[in-house]
Amino acid sequence: MQYTHEHEEIQRTLKRFIDEEINPHVDEWEAAEAFPAHVVFKRLGELGLLGLTKPEKYGGIGLDYSFSVAMAETLGHIACGGVPMAIGVQTDMATPALARFGHEALCREFLKPAIAGTAVGCIGVSEPGAGSDVASIKTTAKKDGGDYVINGSKMWITNSLQADWMCLLANTSEGAAHKNKSLIMVPMNAKGVTRAKKIRKIGMMSSDTGLIHFDDVRVPQTNRVGDEGLGFTYQMMQFQEERLWAAAHAIQSLLNCIEQTADYARERRIFGKSVLDHQVVHYKLAELKTEVESLRGLVYMATEKYVAGGDVTEWASMAKLKACRLSRLVPDACMQYWGGMGYTWENPVARYYRDGRLGSIAGGADEVMLGIIAKSMHTLPARS
């Protein structure tokens, strides 16, 4: 996959916006443990960056998925992990199924303002007792007249404390666990929705993460995305884009971590010469960069196949696994060369270290990715 002039123009526009309107405020937002999502998203919407792959009739640009990858990669220039993750939820996690399977009225109500940046969305899958095991969610949406009545809880939900709507996965029947679920668009100001708790984390500080309760929340059945009972399938399709997004986003942030470390090691002196002059250091940084560039190759290969209409479940899982393991390995290795400075809260590599740890847990843990890969290889043991 090669980026075209159009890809590069979008990346330049986004990079200017990051340099001028995001990075100058990141330290403040990290300290506040929140960022002004409506303000930031409105500006991104004005720049046309929240609907790159979405239909033109709803305000999108209608480009192929390689443009989402280009955007995700450029978001790696943001000097924290929380803000780009929140943006990725809006563009590549909470909206793909809505754009693909939602009926026109539903898309005009929820997708169009999300693309414009006038509404903030979130995706409601994980629960207090169900994270990577999506099939075991307990939240229900039972029919009553023309409505669904929703009861349950969602936890670890990015953007949920500021969100205007949630794309909610709920059980809509008593059938088999993979065939009884539906995606439902839920306004967050609906009666019975409670933003119960802001969850404090060790990283991703500027991204709000909430525990949300649903107590007899009524929404019209017309708020369902696509066919009833296909929610699990739709969510698995969304995961392909979420996982590719996560892998693409990691590339630039990891390269920045390595570059910042090299710059510091060039200035820091030990045993009569700069830290960078020690062969063990510059060889290690070269090795790390090689690993990151191998990740880029896998991401681009998967993107090219996805754009061509192929199923990239295996490659997207491999890319996420590789990206999230590098997001643990690279900051940890780089921190060593900063010495005591690397262990301070304000240090940029320390922030990479804290933020990067989430990747191997969220959006499908490393072990889930390995299970998917093993299944595609037909190496899982036979069930007794």
Image (tube, grey):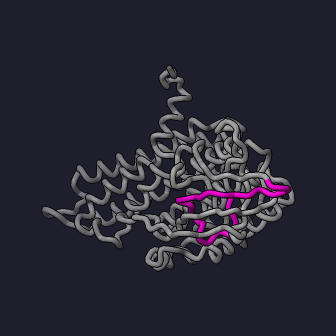
Position of residue 146 in the picture relative to residue 319 (left or right): right
Magenta segment boundaries in residue numbering: 144-167
From this view, report whether residue 193 is shown above or below residue 313: below
Q: Please identify the quarter of the rendering in which residue 348 is found.
A: bottom left
Position of residue 283 in the picture relative to residue 29 (left or right): left
| Residue 384 is inside the magenta segment | no
Asked whether residue 89 is in view, the answer is yes
User: Which residue corresponds to the image point at 75% horizontal and 62% vertical from the top-left?
Assistant: 218
Q: Quadrant of the N terminus?
A: top right
Picture mark count: 0
Overall secondary structure of the magenta section: strand
Q: Closer to the camera, 340 or 160?
A: 160
From this view, report whether residue 280 is shown above or below residue 373: below
Residue 63 spot, x, y in % from top left: 74, 53
From this view, report whether residue 376 is shown above or below residue 4: above
Asked whether residue 7 is in view, the answer is no
| Residue 156 is inside the magenta segment | yes
Residue 350 spot, x, y in % from top left: 35, 64
User: Which residue corresponds to the image point at 26% horizontal and 53% vertical from the top-left?
Assistant: 281
Position of residue 254 in the picture relative to residue 4 (left or right): left
Q: Closer to the camera, 54 or 234?
A: 234
User: Which residue corresponds to the image point at 49% horizontal and 25% vertical from the top-left?
Assistant: 380
Q: Closer to the camera, 91 or 15?
A: 91
From this view, report whether residue 312 is shown above or below residue 87: above
Residue 152 spot, x, y in % from top left: 62, 57
Residue 104 spot, x, y in % from top left: 86, 57
Q: Closer to the camera, 274 or 187?
A: 187
Work out which residue is located at the far left of the displayed protein and give it: 271
User: Which residue corresponds to the image point at 49% horizontal and 76% vertical from the top-left?
Assistant: 29
